[in-house]
Amino acid sequence: MPIEMLVKGLALDPLTRSPIVILKDRDEKKVLPIWIGIFEANAIALELEKIATPRPMTHDLILNVMAGLSAKIRKIEINELKDSTYFANIHLDVASDIIIIDARPSDAIAIALRAEAPIFVSNDVVEKTQSFDMDFKLDSSERMKDWLESLEPEDFGKYKM
């Protein structure tokens, strides 16, 4: 059974300066960091901060096209980790049929945030990435920073474009 996760926030890898999206399960027991590209991080940040752009950005355009076609995003699922690359699917409801679209996790997350759709991570991915069991809450920026600095990208699978 896939685990529902929420976007906790974005961080910057202190060594590579690469953006990291932090996913956390609803019970706040598992945390999954995924290294992403700068443009995808920007798309996620715009939505997290609810910053409106004067013209639709790519992920907004995708949602506008889906709405025009009467398609609804039901969920996204980060469903595979292969050769240090994460894979995701976007589940669309189109005329009561479910259509599954392959996507990069960062794009799927950016779209899910805009559509207010749930984000799931398969158990297989959670096991492969050895996501953290959280015995503490990352309740401050300093604790989050300290925790992130202790991470090694090899432990989780670095996101590849």
Image (spheres, rainbow, N blue to C red):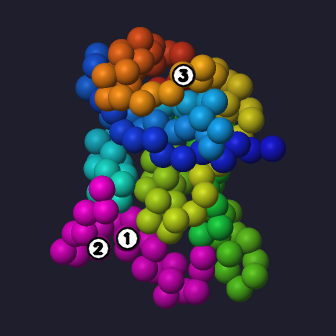
Marks 2 and 3, how far apart at CA: 39 Å
Find residue 136 and name its label: 3
| Residue 83: quarter of image | top right
Q: Is residue 24 left or right of residue 12?
A: right
Q: Quadrant of the N terminus?
A: top right
Marks 1 and 3, how far apart at CA: 35 Å
- Mark sitting earlier along the chain (1/3): 1
Q: In this view, does 66 lie to the left or right of 118?
A: left
The residue carrying mark 1 is 60
Q: Quadrant of the C terminus?
A: top left
Image location of residue 96, percent across then percent down: 75, 82
| Residue 35: quarter of image | top left
Circles 2 and 1, Cβ within 8 Å, touching? The answer is: yes
* Residue occupying image coordinates x 47% and y 59%: 113
- The boundaries of the magenta stretch are 49-72
Q: Which amino acid does label 3 sit on?
A: Phe
Find residue 56 and name its label: 2
Which callout, 2 or 3, points to the residue nearer the camera? 3
- Mark sitting earlier along the chain (2/3): 2
